Amino acid sequence: MGVNIFFVISGFIITHLLLKEERRYGCISILDFYKRRVFRIIPPLYAYLFLLFVFSCLGWLIVDDNSLGYSGTFLCNTSFAECNWFTSHTWSLAVEEQFYLIWPFLFLRFSERNRIYVAVISLVVFSALSMSGEFEVSGRNIPFSFACISAGVFVALSDRVKTWITNSLATSVYAVAFFLVLIPPLVDHFSSGAHKALVLIMPALLSILIFRPLFCQGAVQRIMENRWLGRLGFLSYSLYIWQQVFTAPVNLYMKSSFLQWP
């Protein structure tokens, strides 16, 4: 659920920044967009993959070269790529990178009004695909990830939705959304149909849950603006990259490895 929340926020932030650049300069620079993404994503990831290779050569842990290659080319969210424990978490980066490759060009291609239609169509299509269960990779519902990104994109593009979330969304609706986000694991045991229905509306529920407290002036917004949380957010990508090294199953470490101690 945490990663899905990240996807919603990511879709929103990337689209918000593109809109901000377009309104300020009258256009967007695809080249500058990719420069920012490359220098943010690639150096920490490739440093991690290089050190994984070194650790493997030293006999500290077990990782195969194919996993390193798939991870480095952002393919760990595809059915043909087998990424072992130490690289499996980069499936989320693969989703992000594929979003980065496509969305800026669609953003440029369509007018501001038609972009909303693109976001809605993407949301509907990916949500429908997520219910089929045919596109899961290692237990991860890949279309659902793209549906969450599409939901964030839609909120960023639609001033009406932002206004509704900020001014018109009733507290009772927010409470219901909060409840529905928590219950899918319970519902799954009793009704597969109800579970699929919840999956279908989950991106919208997550959007309500995330953006209501962030758009409204209040305690949550003040907490999220705390400078120490900001610093933690700045480091969060690197922390996410490195988590797998210290949380692997015991059999993936060699006996002499100090990496298993933490």
Image (cartoon, grey):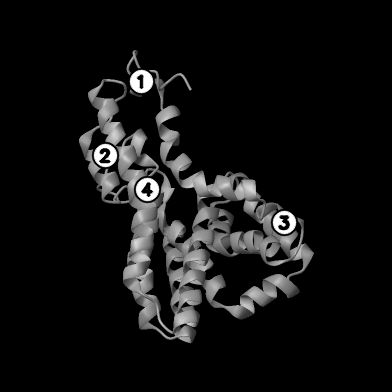
For this view, does 105 lie left or right of residue 21? left
User: In the picture provided, is 105 more to the left or to the right than 202?
Assistant: left
Q: CA distance from mark 2 to mark 1?
A: 17 Å
User: Which sits in the foreground, 179 or 152?
Assistant: 152
**Horizontal relation, residue 181 to residue 68: left or right:** right
x, y percentage for residue 218? 76, 61
User: Upstream in the sequence, badge 1 or badge 4?
Assistant: 4
Tell me how far mark 1 sits from mark 3, CA to CA.
44 Å
Q: Label 4: which residue?
A: 91
Badges 1 and 4: C-beta atoms under 8 Å apart? no
User: Within 10 angstroms of label 2, few (less than 14), some, or many (20 or more) residues?
Assistant: many
Mark 2 and mark 1 lie on one chain; the one further toward the N terminus is 2
Q: What's the residue type where badge 4 is placed?
A: Trp
Distance Cα–Cα, label 4 vs label 2: 11 Å
Q: Secondary structure at mark 4?
A: helix
Residue 87 image offset from top left, x and y in percent: 34, 39
Q: Earlier in the sequence, mark 3 or mark 2?
A: 2
Q: Which residue is mark 1?
A: 251
Give the label on residue 67, or none.
2
The residue carrying pointer 1 sits among few (fewer than 14), some (14 to 19) or many (20 or more) residues within 10 Å by Cα, namely: few
Q: CA distance from mark 3 to mark 2?
A: 41 Å
